[in-house]
Image: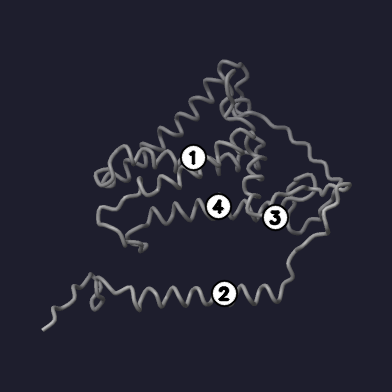
Amino acid sequence: MAAEAPKNKVEGLAEKVHVWPYLVRLEFLCALFTIIGLTVWSIVIDAPLEEAANPTKTPNPSKAPWYFLGLQDILVYFDPWFAGVVAPVLIIVGLMLIPYLDINPKGNGYYTYAERKVAIWVYSFGFLVLWIALIIMGVFLRGPGWNLFMPWQYWDPHKVVALVSVDLPYAFGVRTYEMAMLFGGVVIIGYFALGTAAYLFVERKAIKAVGLLRMLIKVQLYLIMIGIVIKIVLRLGFNIKYVWVTPWFNI
């Protein structure tokens, strides 16, 4: 006589199910509907191809391929050294570190939302906000001169926008160079210190599971992701260029 399958908190549902047919069947149906949708889309909508390249006529604006438009749009909010070097390196290194930082003491195979709330939210934030949203902005909202146009606005090639960029200390009334350097340092260091302390306080149990060092690295990567969005908001809403200004570097 076969042993009864273990039950979870929901009465009548088995704690474990077989990959076939439950998971494979669902994945096959999702892949099938995706292929059908893409096929219909490609038949109904023409590819947005432009005219042949003309060396005597430079397009305005000159845009990168769509999959690089997110990085190109970041250049509006950050210096080239950060948008072109630091940000891509952090993305690549962060993805490489996932298997070493995001360990699961229960073993592999736990991917449900109930088991992986933080991981799913972090991934969704990074993919949808820091990648897809910037690509959509670069494709549909960036017009001539790389100016920002709303969907209902005409893409005027002669539009001139005067941006008066200011540093965050100056916006708060700090005028002296030494005080501005101190103010920016307090803001940056305080952001990472308070963010780290708050996360470690909320996730006290997770520290025991993954270790303090792994948790600290994960938190810093999370804070950098959120900080990029904060800087984009400051740039778009308040024309803030730098938060921390020093003789050696500007952040």
Identified at 28% across, 45% down, the residue is: 210
Identified at 40% across, 34% down, the residue is: 194
The mark that comes first in sequence, 3 or 4, is 4
Residue 214 position, x and y percent, is 33, 41
Identified at 37% across, 40% down, the residue is: 198
Q: Are marks 1 and 4 in contact (CB under 8 Å)?
A: no
Residue 226 position, x and y percent, is 50, 43
> What residue would you read off at disc 4?
129
The mark that comes first in sequence, 1 or 4, is 4
> What residue would you read off at disc 1?
224
Q: Nearer the viewer, mark 2 or mark 1?
A: 2
The mark that comes first in sequence, 3 or 2, is 2
Q: How far is mark 3 from mark 4, CA to CA? A: 15 Å
The mark that comes first in sequence, 1 or 3, is 3
> What residue would you read off at disc 2?
35
Q: How far is mark 1 from mark 3, CA to CA? A: 25 Å
Whether 219 is drawn above or below 140: the answer is above
> What residue would you read off at disc 3?
139
Snapshot colouring: one colour
Q: Which picture quadrant has residue 80?
A: top right
The mark that comes first in sequence, 4 or 2, is 2
Identified at 78% across, 48% down, the residue is: 61
Label 1 environment density (alpha carbons within 10 Å; few <14, some 14–19, many ≥20): some
Q: Nearer the viewer, mark 3 or mark 4?
A: 3
Nearer-the-camera pick, 77 or 150: 77
